[in-house]
Image: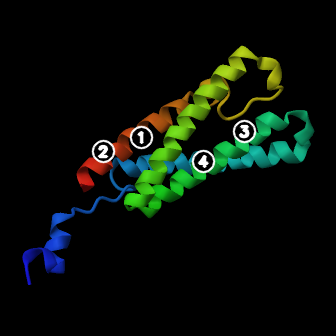
Amino acid sequence: MSDTDRPEVAEARKPSFELGTGPGRVLVWFYAVFTVAAASRTIVEMVRGFDRAPLAYTLSAVAALVYGFITYSLVRGGEKARRAALVCCAAELIGVLVVGAWTLAEPAAFPDSTVWSDFGMGYLFIPVILPVTGMIWLRRARTVAV
């Protein structure tokens, strides 16, 4: 049996790196809070009058789903979850930038705001900062785990 065939040697060569540990815990906390905030806001807005601003409310629901998936991926850990969270963070950033620019360019399209309106200004710009921070953390996790 060679060194590479022994399980204890193979495990020693792959350092474990949990996505939700260290600074990742803060990221998990922010994503969890934003999941609850976006989902709660969406539910209330849709119940009170979906027909008033269907695009805005649908985009808030999408944001809640994205935040929830990223939270789950960070807590779950592992390489597949890291890659999935990285893709979702990139999609989230694109969404924030597109919706943010759209709300500034055509405010009439959004009679009510979304989580991503005005680049997340209503949420202290955290929606635009969070995916960038998440991608940095997830890229760092990759370099440590390899």
Q: Which mark is residue 140?
A: 2
Q: Earlier in the sequence, mark 1 or mark 4?
A: 4
Q: Nearer the viewer, residue 49 or 85?
A: 85
Give how far apart the Cα atoms at labels 2 and 3 are. Answer: 30 Å
Give how far apart the Cα atoms at labels 4 and 2 are. Answer: 21 Å
Q: Earlier in the sequence, mark 1 or mark 2?
A: 1
Q: Earlier in the sequence, mark 1 or mark 3?
A: 3
Mark 1 falls on what kind of element? Answer: helix
Q: Are marks 2 and 3 in contact (CB under 8 Å)?
A: no
What percent of the width, then of the height, locates residue 8?
16, 77
Give how far apart the Cα atoms at labels 1 and 4 are. Answer: 14 Å
Q: Earlier in the sequence, mark 2 or mark 3?
A: 3
Which residue type carries mark 1? Answer: Met
Give how far apart the Cα atoms at labels 4 and 3 are. Answer: 10 Å
Name the residue that disc number 3 marks.
59
Q: Are marks 1 and 4 in contact (CB under 8 Å)?
A: no
